[in-house]
Image (cartoon, rainbow, N blue to C red):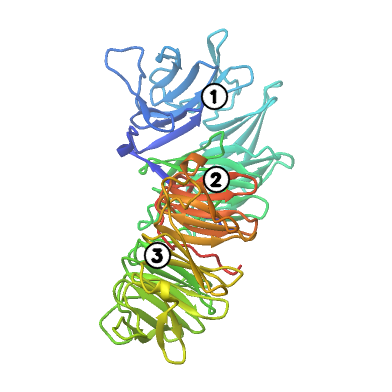
Amino acid sequence: MAQSFSFRHYEVEDNLSYNSVMCSMQDKKGFMWFGTKDGLNRFDGYSFKVFRKIENNPKSLGNNTVFAVCEGDEHTIWVGTYSGIYQYNTITEQFSVLPDTKEHFIRTIKIDDEGKVWFIKDYTLHIYNTKTQKTEKLDTGKERIDVTSFILNKQQVWLATTDGNLWEYNMLSKSLKRYNMFEKSAPAISHWIDKIYDTQQNAILIGTSSQGVKLFNTKTKTYEDILTYNSNKTTIYVRDFMHRTEDEYWIATESGLYVYYLQSRKYINLKHEYSNPYSISDNALYTLSKDREGGIWIGTYFGGINYVPTQHVAFEKYFNQGANNSITGNAVREICEDKFGNLWIGTEDNGLNRLNLKTRQFTHFKPDGKPNSLSHSNIHGLLTVGDKLWVGAFESGLDILDIPSGKVVKHFVAGNGPRSLKSNFVETLYRTKSNMILVATSNGLFRFHEKTQDFTPLCDRTTYGHFITVTEDKEGNIWAGTTREGLRCIDFKHNRVINFRSNEKDTTSISCNAINGIFIDHANRMWVTTENGLNLLDRKTGKFRRFGTKDGFPSDVFYKILEDQHHKLWISTSKGLCAYDFERNKLATYTKSNGILSDQFNFSSASKDVE
């Protein structure tokens, strides 16, 4: 049942007219409409157009406090305000007031199959016939019914009232039946019903001001209390309902959003988190709408509009939340998993993080000047070797951290001797199939010798160059990427080193000499990411096929590649995360609008877990 929701916010800073959003809907043209306490807003996905009352202009909106909005025929939007209903002509962009509603509070508007306009005016239900242009009050006989919400069906109308009753009105016989929604519940300070919603499954959801959500069975004519209290035992005030998918219903309340599963009676309560900019912006929710793409729009009282797009892929976020249990730093450079169930996350701006994957608790490691602490907060390379974590740092050498104790037990720095590192800038660390540990630095690629605890160049051709990425192929060849000198293949079997460099005159050469990553997929295809293009190497011919924006990718800057169980390549770029099915030539790109933290990724900041 666990889900990860990321909310995009639209507020007055985005040209929304007012942050209190009372109603919402999408029209047939795709525009989203939002009624606020200061004007009607039309949103085209990019910008808001605001309609307000204009003095001495009778064809403008007559009142700025909008409580209801509903689409009529193809050229009409009906707008309910604190002072009347206004008919908006989408062609002329002019408003006209509906007779007999001016100076009356309009709570709700709905259109039936015949095009008649049903609306609550001062807690009485009226019907406006668009053909005869006449309005009549719903005939309830001698019964005084103060209506707050209603449901239209073909043969009946369900009415909710201020005193806690649900009325069933038969349109043919004009007969009424009353059902008390509080008689079998605990005493309540108020019997106000704010909203009723037809589930289309012989049940009506009933939202109250003091007893949360009730479920009324339209066959047995009985009800049950299904969601009454918040986690702090306060009562739930319900404002709106919306069916999302299958058994999932969203409930707008004064205490956040409830995602409710009707069959299991399980739910999630999402609230505003002050240190989380991706959480819902406010806890007082008033309106819910689903657009034609499945995205959800939520109107709040203090926080404007919240939008949740259809999540084909859900991204769970980990980011710096200050004092809360969270990651430190914003520039993640390296990620690796150890045998103890921890995920290690190295940042370039604030040290090392350990995430316990079971408890979801973070532990932070930063330099503090003590002998057993890290040498630098700028982490570049991470590698687990048994119960040790090798940590490469920016211009500070190599730390060996004992995982159980969390202490640095050894530190290597560059030296002048023949068996020393020649640079303190460790870019990446790699362990081969034969358990040889390779250290890529800004001045050479080195191998580590366990017995003597020292280093030598991997070969004569790796004593120089700024190496940034390393991998091993099935044949045991080592492939190393540099920041300026292209790609190198160290072929031990034939005692040779092959260089691949970019040639402007040869489009089959590698696209760029600034290499960012090397990846070998399930079909033994070699992919090389660079600062200017993605490359696929044909190792038989030594020729490359280039990919980039011309092929639909969002950027020509590519970083890290991982492959999922469906053989889809996940590729990070400078303008989003790509899911690429090479064999089917299908590409999907995910950006901030899909819930990721940033469109800009970093060099080695990706890891695939064992599951």
User: Label 1, label 3: how many angstroms apart (C-alpha)?
Assistant: 46 Å
Q: Earlier in the sequence, mark 1 or mark 3?
A: 1
**Residue 413 picture location, percent across and down:** 31, 82
Q: Earlier in the sequence, mark 2 or mark 3?
A: 3
In this rendering, the answer to whether 52 lies above or below 366 is above
User: Label 1, label 2: how many angstroms apart (C-alpha)?
Assistant: 27 Å
**Residue 525 picture location, percent across and down:** 60, 58
| Crowd tier of the residue under label 2, counting other residues whose Cα lies within 10 Å: few below 14, some 14–19, many 20 or above | some
Q: Which labelled disc corresponds to residue 114?
A: none
Question: CB of mark 1 within 8 Å of CB of mark 2?
Answer: no
Q: Which one is nearer the viewer's eye here, 486 or 549? A: 486
- At mark 3, the secondary structure is strand
Q: Amino acid at mark 3?
A: Arg
Q: Which labelled disc corresponds to residue 588?
A: 2
Q: Amino acid at mark 2?
A: Ala
Q: Quadrant of the N terminus?
A: bottom right
**Residue 389 picture location, percent across and down:** 44, 80
Identify the residue at image location x=55%, y=47%. 311
In this rendering, the answer to whether 571 lies above or below 332 is above
Question: CB of mark 1 within 8 Å of CB of mark 3?
Answer: no
| Crowd tier of the residue under label 1, counting other residues whose Cα lies within 10 Å: few below 14, some 14–19, many 20 or above | few
Q: Amino acid at mark 1?
A: Lys
User: Residue furthest toward the bottom?
Assistant: 451
Q: Which labelled disc corresponds to residue 333?
A: 3
Which residue was labeled with disc 1?
28
- At mark 1, the secondary structure is loop
User: Residue furthest toward the top?
Assistant: 132
- At mark 2, the secondary structure is strand
Q: Earlier in the sequence, mark 1 or mark 2?
A: 1
